[in-house]
Image (cartoon, rainbow, N blue to C red):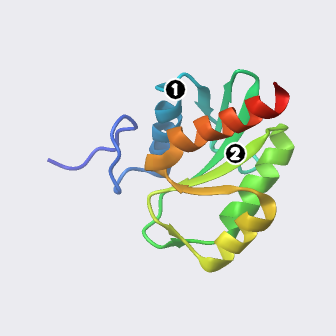
């Protein structure tokens, strides 16, 4: 049978919007109010998630190649546009040196999607300590 993209199960063949839905589902499973945004006009935020007053944006990159610094720029812009406290670029792939350099400057987290829940929770812990 032919492959059918399903946002509940990761597969590198899935379509990019289902990958965004998949990332949102990961966060929802951890108690985040997470929604994949519309396909356009999102200013770089593929997923917007909130928990305990903390808002994060996630740029989702389903890639077969290396993710470049444009993804970091999009996530950083989305963070500002959405008024979020943090930005993450989640991928199934790897990041270029320029992406890592841009992330170090902007504070955007670069992760594999398997690290999404742990990274979001760490951001929540870090920001909760600051406001406590």
Residue 19, given in percent of the width and then of the height, sits at 46, 46
Q: Is residue 12 above or below residue 94?
A: above
- Quadrant containing the C terminus is top right
Q: Secondary structure at mark 2?
A: loop
Q: Which mark is residue 28?
A: 1
x, y percent for residue 110 = 60, 58
What residue lies at 85% left-to-right and 46% top-to-bottom?
A: 80
Crowd tier of the residue under label 1, counting other residues whose Cα lies within 10 Å: few below 14, some 14–19, many 20 or above: some
- Residue at 67% of width from left, 33% of height from top? 125
Horizontal side, residue 65 vs residue 32: left or right? left
Q: Disc 2 or disc 1, which is closer to the eye?
A: 1
**Can you give x and y, in whole percent of width and height, for residue 111 in the image?**
54, 56
Mark 2–mark 1 Cα distance, whole angstroms, equals 16 Å
> Decide: marks 2, 1 in contact (CB < 8 A)?
no
Q: Secondary structure at mark 1?
A: helix
Could you tell me which residue is drawn at 85 percent across and 44 percent down?
A: 81
Residue indicated by mark 2: 45
In this picture, is 71 found above or below 2?
below
Nearer-N-terminus badge (2/1): 1
Residue 119 in view of the camera: yes
Please state the horizontal and vertical placement of residue 33, each as a whole percent of the image: 61, 23
- Asked whether the viewer can see residue 41, the reply is no
């Amino acid at each position: 049978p032919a492959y059918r993209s399903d946002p509940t199960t990761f597969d590198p063949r899935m379509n990019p919007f289902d990958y965004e839905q998949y990332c949102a589902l990961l966060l929802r499973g951890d108690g985040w109010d997470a929604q994949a945004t519309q396909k356009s006009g999102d200013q770089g935020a593929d997923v917007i998630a909130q928990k305990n007053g903390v808002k994060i944006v996630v740029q989702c990159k389903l890639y077969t190649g290396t993710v470049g610094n444009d993804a970091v720029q999009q996530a950083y812009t989305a963070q500002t546009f959405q008024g979020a406290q943090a930005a993450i670029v989640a991928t199934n792939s790897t990041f270029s040196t320029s992406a890592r350099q841009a992330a170090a400057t902007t504070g955007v987290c670069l992760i594999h999607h398997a690290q999404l829940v742990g990274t979001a929770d760490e951001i929540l812990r870090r920001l909760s300590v600051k406001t406590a």
